[in-house]
Image (tube, rainbow, N blue to C red):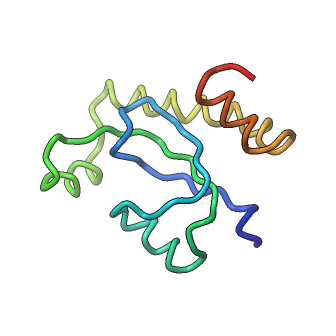
Amino acid sequence: VPVEKILVVHDEIDLPPGSARLKLGGGHGGHNGLRDIVAQIGRDFARLRLGVGHPGNKNAVTNYVLRKPSIDDGRMIHESIADAADVMPLLVREGFEKAMTKLHTGKG
């Protein structure tokens, strides 16, 4: 599969719960799953970043991302997944930039 056809979906502690952002390229930022993907295919792939929030202490990150989110955070995360799913047809039809604008601003 050509790298330009890949969209990696991952949790993102640097975004608040309920946020969904499309991004092209970048490093792994310490994310173990992304670290492996970057090692295999390089950095130049599309990502859908789903915000899960940060525990506030870098030493608590591992346990935080592996546990079930709170009810409120879980609801917001599910809503962001639905929002992201809604722009996927636009991504396929009109491209990354249009889908990114729609997801990030609600316009497009």
Image quarter hosting the N terminus: bottom right
Residue 18 vs 2, above or below: the answer is above
Q: Residue at x 61, y 35 (%)?
A: 84
Residue 21 percent location from the top left of the image = 54, 39
Q: Residue at x 58, y 53 (%)?
A: 47
Residue at 13 percent across and 46 percent down: it is 57
Assign the C terminus to one quadrant of the image. top right
User: Which residue is nearer to you in this view: 6 or 69?
Assistant: 6
Q: Quadrant of residue 54?
A: top left
Where's residue 104, x and y in %?
59, 29
Viewer-nearest residue: 63 or 103: 103
Residue at the farthest bottom position: 40
Describe residue 90's horizontal placement relative to residue 66 as left or right: right
| Numbered disc total | 0
> Which quarter of the picture shows residue 70?
top left
Which quadrant of the figure has residue 103? top right
Residue at the top extreme?
107
Q: Residue at x 36, y 33 (%)?
A: 16
Q: Position of residue 12 (x, y in %)?
A: 40, 47
Apparent side of residue 86 relative to residue 18 in the rendered image (left or right): right
Q: Where does the image place residue 44, in percent across and percent down from the top left?
A: 62, 65
